[in-house]
Amino acid sequence: MVDPLELVVVAFAGGAFGAAVGALEAFSLAGVLVIVGEAVDVAADGLPGPSGDPAALGSSGLTALTGLGPLFGPHVAFAGGAAATAFAARQGYLDSDFEYHEAKHVTAALGPRADVMAVGGAFGVVGVGLVAASVRLGLPFDPISFGIVVSGLLHRLVLGFPLVGTVRGETPLDMTPYERRIRRPPRADGGDNRRRFAVEPWLPGQSDPARAALLGAVVGVVGAFLTFRTGSPFLAFGLAAATLLFRCAGVERVPVTHHAALVSSLAVVGLAGGAATPAAFAAATSPAVALLVGAVFGAVTALAAELAQRLLYAHADTHLDPPAVGILVGTSLVVLLDLVDVFQQSLLPTLGL
């Protein structure tokens, strides 16, 4: 087990790193590290026993140490980078052609600014603390996504941004002002002269619910297949996260899918009674059923993320991660089915039940 002081120092460094290289860049790197860790485990003919750190979703080896751990884990490097982006925007350090509020510009690498890295580091430590608290309490969902979501809400409060924002459509779910390219009125105090869109949807290209559900179902099949055939519940997540390197490079049409990949994989593990090898999966259920379950959970998770962006992102000023909310919803469903004996799994906490 990691010494608490060492954990704090490492988490601070991870959050500061996320601030320097950019939140999404750090998350994409975590995806690459998960791929490497899971590939090593699969090549070793099956996954070794779960990590001693329950915050890492039962993962082991490099995955638990790096991709989902206290150094590059999304609750540390990504959440720290997102908080640092909000801080940099508040300080006026960001002045790009980003069409939304600069505090949402999570692909912006902020470089080695001491104050920005300090904020990122502080929220890296916050992320580790939130995940540890979630695990200790046995909260019935993915603790890493819990850490990301709560950290995002906290940095809004701490840095003086509105918690939700002002609704400018007919309802909080109304994205049509963006579709009509309606801009916000000029500020009375003359500040922030760049006129933002009235509503700022996360990833407009996959904001349509039908498209989101279809994409989630497709990725859910991918996650289910890879989990069923390799025994790894994290490989599909790593692959999906790593594709975001293309978004960091400016390829805007690359979709964000890691939330659907992770939840579909965890659902298949639960369906198969917590199986951890391809042989155990094959003995517990059929490929057809696994693919169907993966598609359903992928679609549900994608729709939950879309609902989250409409409620918590589109009207606000900073990045509150819709995929993390989607994972919270999706993993809560996995736990619920575990508690009623439809699934059987040990990767997610279940309130001690």
Image (cartoon, rainbow, N blue to C red):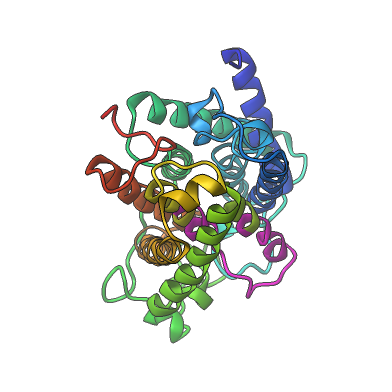
Q: Nearer the viewer, residue 2 or 277?
A: 277
Quadrant of residue 67 in the image?
Answer: top right
Q: Residue at x 53, y 77 (%)?
A: 205
Residue extending furthest toward the front = 283
Considering the image in quadrants, where does the C terminus appear? top left
- Expressed as whole percent of the image width and height from the top left, the position of residue 182 reads 44, 82
Magenta region: which residues? 240-263
- Expressed as whole percent of the image width and height from the top left, the position of residue 140 reads 32, 38
Image vertical order of residue 346 relative to residue 193, above or below: above
User: Can see residue 162?
Assistant: no
**Per the image, is 257 magenta?**
yes
Residue 29 as seen in the image, left or right of residue 272? right
Image vertical order of residue 151 relative to residue 176, above or below: above
Quadrant of residue 18 in the image?
Answer: top right
Residue extending furthest toward the bottom = 180
User: Can see residue 344?
Assistant: yes
**Per the image, is 128 magenta?**
no
Quadrant of residue 193 in the image?
Answer: bottom right
- Expressed as whole percent of the image width and height from the top left, the position of residue 68 reads 59, 38
Residue 107 as seen in the image, left or right of residue 203? right
Q: Residue at x 60, y 21 (%)?
A: 8
Number of numbered discs on residues? 0
Residue 305 as seen in the image, left or right of residue 117? left
Q: Nearer the viewer, residue 67 or 325?
A: 67
- Expressed as whole percent of the image width and height from the top left, the position of residue 260 reads 48, 60
Residue extending furthest toward the left = 340
Q: Residue at x 60, y 12 (%)?
A: 3
Q: Residue at x 41, y 44 (%)?
A: 153
Considering the image in quadrants, where does the N terminus appear? top right
Residue 106 as seen in the image, left or right of residue 202? right
Q: Nearer the viewer, residue 202 or 295?
A: 295
